[in-house]
Amino acid sequence: MNSYQLFQAGMFIIFIGIIVLIIASFLSAKDETKITSDKSSTAKFSVIGIFGFIPFGFGNDKKMLIVTLILAIIIMIVSFFLFYRKVVFV
């Protein structure tokens, strides 16, 4: 496979992911209209970001925040090794 085919495959996967997100949001909004207003929500969230080489995050659940920060550190390590690997063209 050449680089153009890989680019096309990546764009196709991103496009499919966006379509899935749109469909899921419509289905979720449809289900939320059935919920009455007297029930309280227990939604948990966690958001991470990377500023330079320092990961940071915030959320309303401590366990979820720890998991997302660990995932951010793993992604940083993998991207570091992929960026600085020795590329050999055959």
Image (tube, rainbow, N blue to C red):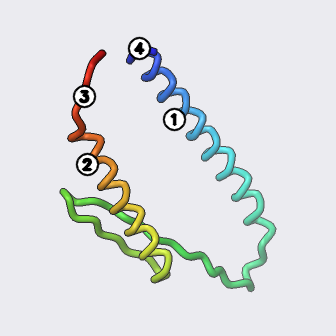
Dot 4 or dot 1, earlier in sequence: 4
Q: Position of residue 42 (x, y in %)?
A: 63, 81
Q: Is residue 46 above or below residue 23?
A: below
Residue at mark 2 to residue at mark 4: CA–CA distance? 24 Å
87 relative position to 33: left or right: left
Distance between mark 3 and mark 4 Cα atoms: 16 Å
Q: Give how far across and how far down residue 76 sits, in percent.
A: 30, 55
Q: Nearer the viewer, mark 3 or mark 2?
A: 3
Q: Looking at the image, how many numbered discs can be counted on the residues?
A: 4
Q: Which residue is mark 2?
A: 80
Q: Mark 2 belongs to which amino acid?
A: Phe
In the drawing, what numbered circle is on residue 14? 1
CA separation, marks 2 and 1?
Answer: 23 Å
Q: Residue beneath label 4, please?
A: 2
- Which is nearer the N-term, disc 2 or disc 1? 1
Q: Position of residue 58 (x, y in %)?
A: 38, 74
Amino acid carrying mark 4 in the image: Asn
Three-letter code for the amino acid on which mark 3 is drawn: Val
Q: Quadrant of residue 4?
A: top left
**Secondary structure type for disc 1:** helix
> Nearer the N terminus, badge 3 or badge 4?
4
Residue at the spot x=78%, y=77% of the render?
36
What is the number of the mark on residue 87? 3
* Vertical position of residue 13 compared to residue 25: above or below: above
Task: Give the residue drawn at x 65%, y 80%.
Answer: 41
Query: Considering only vertical position in the picture, is 11 above or below 48?
Result: above
Look at 73% across and 66% down and name the residue there: 32
